[in-house]
Amino acid sequence: MGETTALIGLDWGTSSLRAYRLAATGGVLERRRADLGILGIAGGAFEDALSAFLGDWLRAGPAVPLLASGMITSRQGWVETPYLPCPVTVEALAAALVERRLRSGHRILFVCGLSTRGTDGVPDVMRGEETQIAGALAEGVSARLLVLPGTHSKWVRCAEGRIVDFATMMTGELYELLRRHSILGRLMREGEEDGEAFARGVARGMADDPASGGLLHRLFGVRSLGLLGEVPPPGLASYLSGLLLGSELREAALLFGTREVPGLIGEPGLVERYRAACAGVGRPCRVLPPDLAARGLFELARRSGILDSP
């Protein structure tokens, strides 16, 4: 297996499991991915699924600790960890790891989620993204506003090495619901990405024009533009995507009151979509390095001291 494994990091979400075999320096020696999301594991047999997927790694390093973050730490996951209230430091996250033992004797620790509360008193939560942010902070990323696109996109404000607060946008989930289960999807046809339709949607979503209404009114334009042939059927999904993304950018500007350059963290395809949306409305952004989840897992393990103890 080559270089000695110091840590096995697990980024375990709703739809997939990403595993990293990490060296003592934090470098990724090997990575694996499988469609082993928490909702697809029958009867909550998480340890069995993990042993089947990473049995060779576990056998090769009987004293190697494991560190897991993501929805595996949720109420539907393996071990439910608490939410730490923001603002929070990476040190506080590392100190709050929840430990269990596998049947093999390996230590496995679970990362806590984070919570915040808006000025209206309504709470917001995250699980998994806090580890990527810890990785970004460990890399010395200077951006004070981070954006993590996904089913539930996170906009996160950081300052002085702390995660200060954040806001969740249900953009990805709303897109899938509207495309698959609403009348807006009836006219859509599969086809290549339509950049012009996407940009048009972003511009309308971003428009600060009371006369054009809000998102609830603007959404019906997906259907009417299709009915009148002003956006071709293969371009309607691109238009809807752009409209929702533009609305997200507009809401984020209202919530955070800043025009500073955000840092984008996530899957390359999604990150590129957000970068294009920002560029289309004259807002530059930075695409941050990949593998920040692995970097964050290692940093949390290092700061907790588990790399130096049996």
Image: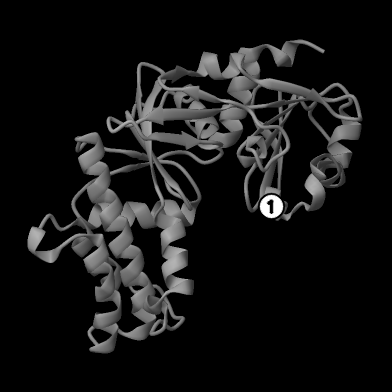
Q: Amino acid at mark 1?
A: Leu
Left or right, 72 with reference to 106? left
Front position in the image: 260 or 5: 260
How many labels, in total? 1
Above or below, 77 relative to 164: below
x, y percent for residue 130: 51, 31
Report the residue at 46% width, 29% height from top: 115
* Displayed quadrant of residue 10: top right
x, y percent for residue 23: 71, 26
Front position in the image: 69 or 263: 69
Mark yes or no: residue 231 visible: no
Query: Is label 1 in a helix, a strand or a loop?
Result: helix
Report the residue at 60% width, 21% height from top: 300
x, y percent for residue 69: 63, 34
Above or below, 117 relative to 76: above
* Displayed quadrant of residue 68: top right
* Displayed quadrant of residue 306: top right
Q: Residues within 10 Å of mark 1 (few under 14, many from 20)?
A: some
Residue farthest to the bottom, as pictured: 228
Left or right, 299 with reference to 175? right
Which quadrant is the N terminus positioned in? Answer: top right
Mark yes or no: residue 97 visible: yes
Which quadrant is the C terminus positioned in? Answer: top right
x, y percent for residue 179: 43, 72
Q: Which residue is mark 1?
A: 39
Report the residue at 46% width, 81% height from top: 190
